Image (cartoon, helix red, strand yellow):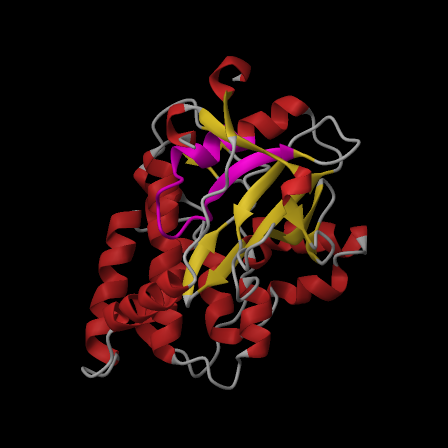
Amino acid sequence: MDVNSGQCATSNYYEFENLSKTIGFGGSASVYTAKWMGTTTTYAIKRFCNSSRDDIINEVYLMGKVNCYPNIIKICGVMTLEGEANYSLILKYANSGTLGEYLRENAATFRWEDQLKFANDIASAVLCLHSYQIIHGDLHSGNVLIHQHSIKIADFGRSRLHGSVISKKEKAFGPRVLFWKLTTRKSPFDFETKNNDPFEIIKIKTNILEGVRERPSPSTNHKFVTLYERCWQCEPHERPEIGQLISELNNIESLVVPCSFSFKEIETTDESHESENEEVNVPCYDCDINKYV
């Protein structure tokens, strides 16, 4: 499969087994785990509920443009489930769930070094997306996955190609609330308990437009607080450029992370562990998605 060139692998649903466990759902899609028949390799299958064929093709196309980037979830192919006409996506499975789940389950052991690494991963992924003029459109902790201690940005259902070059200031706006959540492990404005109340949602949106922001955790490094507070400024010219954001994250790391700690060592260890469970190449046929775009 070569989704980067517009060639996307197609597979048959009966070549997968144990397609039952739901690991995520939303208004337009549900995500299940499945194993490639005769192997122990797990994939995530994204089944669309209320999306048009054009919307699905657009999502495949955009994911294909950034499919090789390490901090963006990989699309492995597409298939049609039994009795359905629309495509479902075959995605690489992230073994540690969403960022929100990960923070809840690892609150006691989530270190300052982890916060910085995840922040850097998120910023790097956003930089990659915008270098291809892609606006994610729905970047929150439920669409940020964790695999082998690395961030994987997912769910391109609301993503789109920007019609012109994205401004450097606009680039630093996306990760703002995620950085705050990394340090507090909380939902901004207690959103998760209020998202079924339309009046509360309107109130939260109004407050944000009027400049109301969440308070930082008292234990957070003040340089990191200053950095993410600059990212959520209303005026684009007051935000740091995305490259500057990454540079300042690296500077903070050099000041506060112990010399004995190495992000590179973590990544190397994870890669060697993953190679032991190397992804199975899914036998498939190629289809040209360019003709649908």
Q: Position of residue 125 (x, y in %)?
A: 38, 49
Of residues 28 and 68, the one nearer the viewer is 68
For the view shown, which residue lies furthest in the front direction? 38
- What residue range appears in magenta? 59-79
Q: Is residue 231 visible?
A: yes
188 horizontally vs 227: left or right: right
Q: Position of residue 128 (x, y in %)?
A: 34, 42
Image quarter of residue 14: top right
Write the residue at 48% across / 62% down: 146
Q: How many marks?
A: 0
244 horizontally vs 287: left or right: left
Write the residue at 46% across / 50% down: 280
Image quarter of residue 224: bottom left
For the view shown, which residue lies furthest in the bottom direction? 108
Q: Position of residue 126 (x, y in %)?
A: 39, 47
Of residues 48 and 188, the one nearer the viewer is 48
Write the residue at 59% across / 37% down: 157
Q: Position of residue 202 (x, y in %)?
A: 72, 49
Image quarter of residue 5: top left
- Say above or below: 139 vs 249: above
- Say above or below: 82 vs 250: above
Write the residue at 42% across / 66% down: 148
Q: Is residue 263 magenta?
A: no
Q: Is residue 239 visible?
A: no
